[in-house]
């Protein structure tokens, strides 16, 4: 399938992987890229030396384009912005902030710049700042989210911009891809589906939670901190949601008990203290497959629906 995104990124399919903090390391990124999408290594708040190693391992595992996601609230964002240039990374996506100050240097180095944005206003700012494309991420997504839905956000961003738009949030099969194209997107970003992949190195407990999840099993916590996050419902995420609702947890206390909770979920499978970030589409995901199968099946279904 050829779109402006496959042309821009030099990939077979217009599918980029979500930059899931703690989750998206070299094994997953190289598997997605080798399957014809664009895999991403997530910067999260990881140390720079670790990320340099991740990028180098990914280069050994694939000769296809792959990227790095920079979480702009990370204290290491400046260093990672420089590292991607030094390491010749082809694609950067950003989240949780405005990357405008880094864009000139990335463009000069030939890096394709794709900010993830939750609103039309931010999308326009990113186009003016020189972005090559944007990911319009609906509130169905896992992790840190905005308020607008994929269905409403994507066509409004498409109408507002000249650069191509990648749809994200709630896409895990060919129907989601076909619907995204109908909304005017030129590509999709898929996150949660890849949590249930063979190459994804998260704790088995996390994968089991995704497989068991029903349509109603995700919950948004932390709206009152200014950083709302979608997670799987667990005793811990319900405790956070209740504490927020009844005032028994102050925003500071909330921040304190969630500090380190992503790592506890991903690496330790710690159900008592971990935040298992996932999208609202988790209820539709019932099996673990290799990334190559996931992408091939999704694209076959999408192409059939779109009759191309
Ligand atoms: O960034 C994400 N998803 C994430 S980041 C993350 S790690 C984290 N954990 C706790 C709190 C905060 C982060 C987990 N999931 N998605 C892309 C995204 N970007 N969603 C929302 C935004 C966003 C928000 C504000 C982008 C730009 C923005 O700009 C504000 C400004 O500076 O104008």
Image: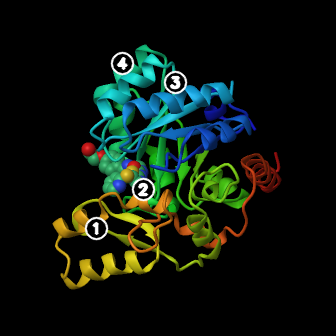
Q: Which of marks 3 and 4 is in front?
A: 3
Name the quarter where the N terminus is drawn. top right
Q: Confirm or reject: label 2 Cβ below 8 Å from ligand 1.
A: no
For marks 4 and 1 on the same chain, the one whose residue lies earlier in the sequence = 4
For marks 3 and 1 on the same chain, the one whose residue lies earlier in the sequence = 3
Residue 202 versus residue 127: which sits nearer the camera?
202
Outermost residue toward the front in this view: 268
Residue 211: image quadrant is: bottom right
- The local crowd at label 1, few if under 14, some if 14 to 19, many if 20 or more residues have their Cα within 10 Å, is some
**Does residue 181 sit above or below 67 in this rendering?**
below
Q: Which residue is denoted by mark 3 in the rendering?
A: 89
**Does residue 272 sit above or below 19 in this rendering?**
below
Q: Which residue is denoted by mark 1 in the rendering?
A: 223
Question: Disc 4 and disc 1: Cα gap in Å?
Answer: 34 Å
For marks 3 and 4 on the same chain, the one whose residue lies earlier in the sequence = 3
Question: Disc 2 and disc 3: Cα gap in Å?
Answer: 25 Å
Instruction: Check disc 3 and report its element: helix, strand or loop.
Output: loop
Q: Which of marks 4 and 2 is in front?
A: 2
Snapshot colouring: rainbow
Q: Do the residues labelled 2 and 3 touch (CB within 8 Å)?
A: no
């Amino acid at each position: 399938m050829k779109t402006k995104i496959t042309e821009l990124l030099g990939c077979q399919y217009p599918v980029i992987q979500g930059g899931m903090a703690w989750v998206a390391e070299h094994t997953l990124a190289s598997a997605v890229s080798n399957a014809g999408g664009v895999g991403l290594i997530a910067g999260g708040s990881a140390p720079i030396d670790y990320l340099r190693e991740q990028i180098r391992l990914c280069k050994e595992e694939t000769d296809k384009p792959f990227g790095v996601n920079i979480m702009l609230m990370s204290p290491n964002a400046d260093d990672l912005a420089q590292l991607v240039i030094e390491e010749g990374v082809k694609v950067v996506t950003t989240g949780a902030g405005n990357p405008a100050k880094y864009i000139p240097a990335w463009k000069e180095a030939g890096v394709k710049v794709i900010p993830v944005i939750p609103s039309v206003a931010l999308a326009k700012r990113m186009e003016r700042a020189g972005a090559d494309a944007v990911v319009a991420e609906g509130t169905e997504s896992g992790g840190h989210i905005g308020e607008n839905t994929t269905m409403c956000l994507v066509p409004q961003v498409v109408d507002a911009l000249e650069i191509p738009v990648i749809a994200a949030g709630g896409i895990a099969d060919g129907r989601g891809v076909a619907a995204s194209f109908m909304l005017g997107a030129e590509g999709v970003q898929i996150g949660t589906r890849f949590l249930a992949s063979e190459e994804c190195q998260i704790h088995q407990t996390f994968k089991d939670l995704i497989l068991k999840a029903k349509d109603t099993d995700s919950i948004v916590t932390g709206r009152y901190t200014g950083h709302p996050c979608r997670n799987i419902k667990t005793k811990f995420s319900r405790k956070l949601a209740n504490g927020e609702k009844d005032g028994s947890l102050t925003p500071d206390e909330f921040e304190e008990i969630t500090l380190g909770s992503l790592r506890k979920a991903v690496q330790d499978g710690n159900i008592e203290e971990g935040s298992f970030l996932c999208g609202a589409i988790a209820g539709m995901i019932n099996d673990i497959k290799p990334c190559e199968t996931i992408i091939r099946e999704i694209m076959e279904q999408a192409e059939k629906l779109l009759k191309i």
